[in-house]
Image (cartoon, coloured by chain):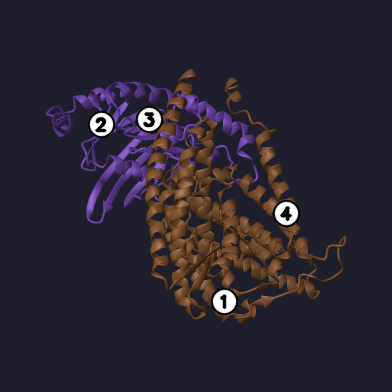
Amino acid sequence: MNALELKAIHKNFGKTQIIRGIDLAVTTGERVAIIGPNGAGKSTLFNLISGRFAPTSGEIWLSSQRIDGKQPFEINRLGLSRSFQITNIFPKLSVFENLRCAVLWSLGYKYSFLKFLADLDDANDLAQHYMERIRLDKKRDVLAMNLTYAEQRALEIGITIAGGAEVILLDEPTSGMSKSETLRFIQLIRQVTEGKTLLTVEHDMGVVFGLADKIAVVVYGEVIAYDTPDAVRSNPKVQEAYLGSAKSH
Amino acid sequence: MQTSATYYAFKPFNIARWVIWGLFAFVLLLAPKAFSSNFSISMLTQMGAVMIVCLSYNMLLGQGGMLSFGHAVYTGLGAYIAMHTLNAAANGLLPIPVSLIPLVGGIGGMFFAVLFGYVTTRKSGTTFAMITLGISELVFAMSLMFSGFFGGEAGISGNRVFGQPFLGITFGPPIQVYYLTATYTFICVALMYAFTRTPLGRILNAVRDNPERVEFIGYNTQQVRYMAFIIAGFFAGIAGGIGALNFEIVTAEVVGAARSGAYLLFTFLGGATFFFGPIIGAILLVLAYVLLSEFTKAWLLYLGLVFLFMVMFAPGGISSLIMMNLRLAAFGRLRHIWVAYIGLGITALLGLAGVAAIVEMVYHLQLDAAMGPEVRFAGFTLNTELSHTWFGCAMLVVTGFGLFELARRQYVHDWGESQEFIEKEIKRREEAL
């Protein structure tokens, strides 16, 4: 069963082709890392899947639902959630409020203005639960803008997973972190996305090989390899296009 | 997850909250005892209505990040609907009691918010602001075209006293209108406060902070803005209905851009970041428009200056100044800074007195020169023909603001010290946790 499937996806900005025909199938429960040089179209690919942009052509399927061209909130309601490379949280709300906002829709509260938040035990429990999982429970009432960078990145992940989506997209979750922070953070990601289908864009090669079941290598808007880490590592096309150039740095 | 439930245990009998709401009701109840002339009771009624308007406006500005330039459209059209309903009821066409007329105004305001909000809330930010401005102009232009509904230059007038009195209440005396208004004010303020604690209210804050991310947690930001806009329109219309009852006349200026501007500026002045800010703003609005305009012809100039300095030095408005100092007091630092406050106050007063004297003299020369060279100002008589009067005023300005600058430096230093102390204290408490 495929949790997510991309069929012949193209995306042009004006005359520039950014994504040039990508087919990709992700099995339920799999962890897939997308790697590739800067400008290869990795982030654009995430934006297409999550509904930020509509693809120029091609189809995107979330299990049995076709989602290409849908609005981000529609796709989110169908069970796909994403994080952002540049921290994208609610700066003037507390850590707890950030997470509570993220659980409300999935619990069916929608646009309710006839209930008090304080009375929503399930939402409060769930927000508390995720706050503990991302280890920010001591910062419950701190405004998100006053958190440290690493804490904000953790909150970013927390907001992404709190809605209970089965398919999680993480766009460079460890960007801007130090080596030791990255290692700890990968551990955290591994824990909180247990049992979910995970797609992640990552630059750090060590991280990718440790975290992913499969790796998709994107170069110039095309997937040139999609296989297990070991197979990708020894793939000559990948070595030439990506790993080779990375090693030369 | 069971153990974690203690962290956010809801306190249904939060004493501070009961005290504050009790005080609010108490003040509403006793205000006419303290200010009992018909003139002040009419002012109190206006304050009640404007509180509802400014709080409803802040639902858009402070809580939703929507800068509307046309909020008077919804109070104004609500007022017109209320007035037409009042007249229909007085003629026996509709069986609606006077006490429900504000509610009719609310439904009117909501109706137009449903209609216009559908267009305005499609977009946020600058585009939203421009569309609200456009709709404001559109409705004002229509008020000149459809004189049947808007009553042309004379407006629509009515009489709130008709039918049999209910329990002796005729709504003839202003005090009865005041207590009707106070009841509406209390209920509306409570409802609007309750709104801030609901799922929609919180998601509205999230839309203000980061609309893009809201789309990725399952919410349609347009829908959130639209619903908030409709609710704000409802409360704005209630205030319009109260205004119609209070004045017994509605003219086209109630939908005008000047009104919208006043609501925006005074909500900002009171402070958009805290719930109670607009209440302060509403009181100041009525004081400025009714009292200040009596004292001096230059009142709009003074208002302009106040806003200018507020935006530059205290963009959170009066309420944030209060909260910042309460924080200081909570950490016991207020006693380190009150001397600096007195210094600031006295020097600012000197400088401002000089500025005001000059402004009053200039206005006098421009408008009332025929009435002689003398101006009464703050108990002094100033002669505009003598150069030493002008020189004295200029000296007052220079000395006042010169000393103010010295006081300000001391204050900034003291303030910084206290903030540093508080930061350290918070860190220490966090670590002790």
- Residue A203: mark in rendering: 2
Name chain B's colour: brown
Tell me the SS state at disc 2: loop
- Badges 4 and 2, same chain: no
Question: Mark 4–mark 1 contact, CB under 8 Å?
Answer: no
Residue at x 45%, y 40% (from the top left corner): B340
Question: Would you say residue B131 is visible in this rendering?
Answer: no
Q: Nearer the viewer, mark 3 or mark 4?
A: 4
Q: Which residue is mark 3?
A: A148
Q: Distance between the Cα atoms at labels 3 and 2?
A: 22 Å
Question: The disc numbered 3 marks a residue on which chain?
Answer: A
Return the residue nearer the eye: B95 or A46. Answer: B95
> How dense is the environment of label 2, judged by Cα within 10 Å: few (below 14), some, or many (20 and up)?
some
Whether residue A52 is situated above or below residue B421 in the rendered picture: below
Left or right, A1 with respect to A129, comes to left
Q: Amino acid at mark 2?
A: His
Nearer mark to the viewer, of 4 and 2 = 4
